[in-house]
Image: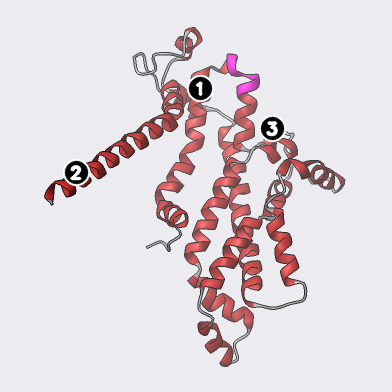
């Protein structure tokens, strides 16, 4: 009887090893472009003009990063991206939390129809509304402003859906006790329900910030002045117009420098991202 068990254990162990190797290969494929960009950022530009191969062999240089610190528009573009991403995050959390609580706990005429419309908005591609959106902001002369870069992203159906489902999972008995003590609905929401939703708030906040930081399509349409470029648009413009004069290594160094805030943010809040994917509360 021991032989079948041993064979089954061997098969399970072999399958685990195959799965582990497959995951390693996929991870290597995913990380290869990042390694390539980082490697190019440490190479002299005159060397890269001849060939972009051999990134693991000398010569290496820190001049590309020194040039960024000395004089570059990257810092201003990073500030623009930070303002836009933080503004989107704060306002999205506020709107999604209030809307989600309204759908989860209150009754009002047309509630189901309105929630269906919110869900339907998830299926509308961004490209389908870009022309009317551009026209609307052009009529009120808001292009090349932070308001124009932030406002369109506040309509975030996924955030409303996430917060609605999270609030529904909270036991209503907690709120009923406070309501019996003559607390207002908003006070119950602000003092009791909102603190209980911190894991969902953190998950939505991280997702919104990353989306705002990496957003390219709408800032490309709305921000036409270089001083209002976000980081993604600014780096794309430099790669298009100045790749030969500035040097590939310098451009890659800017890309690495631009990605550092997102990497740091992920390292600090990765447990919330993992818990959101796993569907369990962060610990």
Residues rendered magenta in the picture: 239-245
Q: Main secondary structure of the magenta part?
A: helix
Q: Which mark is residue 250?
A: 1
Tell me: 251 left or right of 218. Answer: left
Residue 218, image quadrant: top right
Residue placed farthest to the right in the image? 139
CA distance for labels 2 and 3: 66 Å
Mark 3 surroundings: few (<14), some (14-19) or many (≥20) residues within 10 A: some
Picture mark count: 3
CA distance for labels 2 and 1: 56 Å
Mark 2 surroundings: few (<14), some (14-19) or many (≥20) residues within 10 A: few
Out of 196 and 18, give the one closest to the viewer: 18
Circle 3 is placed at which residue position? 226
Q: Which mark is residue 7?
A: 2
CA distance for labels 3 and 1: 19 Å
Name the N-terminal-most of marks 2 and 1.
Answer: 2
Q: Are marks 2 and 1 in contact (CB under 8 Å)?
A: no
């Amino acid at each position: 009887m021991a032989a079948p068990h041993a064979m089954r254990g061997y098969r399970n162990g072999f399958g685990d090893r195959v799965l582990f190797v497959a995951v390693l290969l996929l991870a290597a494929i995913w990380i290869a472009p990042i390694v390539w960009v980082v490697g190019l950022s440490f190479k002299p530009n005159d060397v890269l003009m001849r060939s972009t191969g051999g990134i693991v062999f000398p010569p290496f240089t820190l001049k590309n990063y020194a040039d960024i610190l000395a004089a570059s528009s990257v810092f201003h573009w990073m500030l623009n991206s930070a303002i836009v991403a933080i503004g989107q995050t704060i306002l999205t959390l506020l709107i999604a939390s209030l809307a989600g609580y309204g759908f989860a706990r209150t009754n009002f005429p047309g509630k189901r129809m309105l929630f269906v419309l919110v869900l339907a908005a998830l299926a509308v591609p961004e490209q389908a509304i870009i022309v009317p959106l551009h026209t609307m902001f052009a009529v009120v002369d808001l292009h090349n402003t932070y308001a124009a870069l932030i406002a369109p992203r506040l309509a975030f159906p996924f955030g409303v859906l996430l917060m609605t489902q999270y609030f529904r999972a909270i036991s209503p008995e907690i709120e009923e006790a406070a309501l019996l003590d003559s607390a207002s609905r908003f006070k119950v929401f602000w003092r009791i329900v909102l603190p209980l939703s911190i894991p969902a708030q953190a998950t939505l906040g991280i997702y919104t910030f990353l989306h705002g930081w990496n957003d390219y399509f709408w800032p490309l349409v709305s921000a036409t002045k270089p001083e209002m470029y976000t980081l993604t648009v600014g780096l794309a413009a430099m790669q298009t117009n100045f790749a030969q004069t500035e040097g590939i290594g310098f451009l890659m160094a800017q890309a690495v420098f631009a990605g550092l805030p997102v990497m740091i943010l992920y390292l600090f809040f990765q447990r919330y991202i993992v818990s959101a994917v796993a569907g369990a509360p962060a610990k």
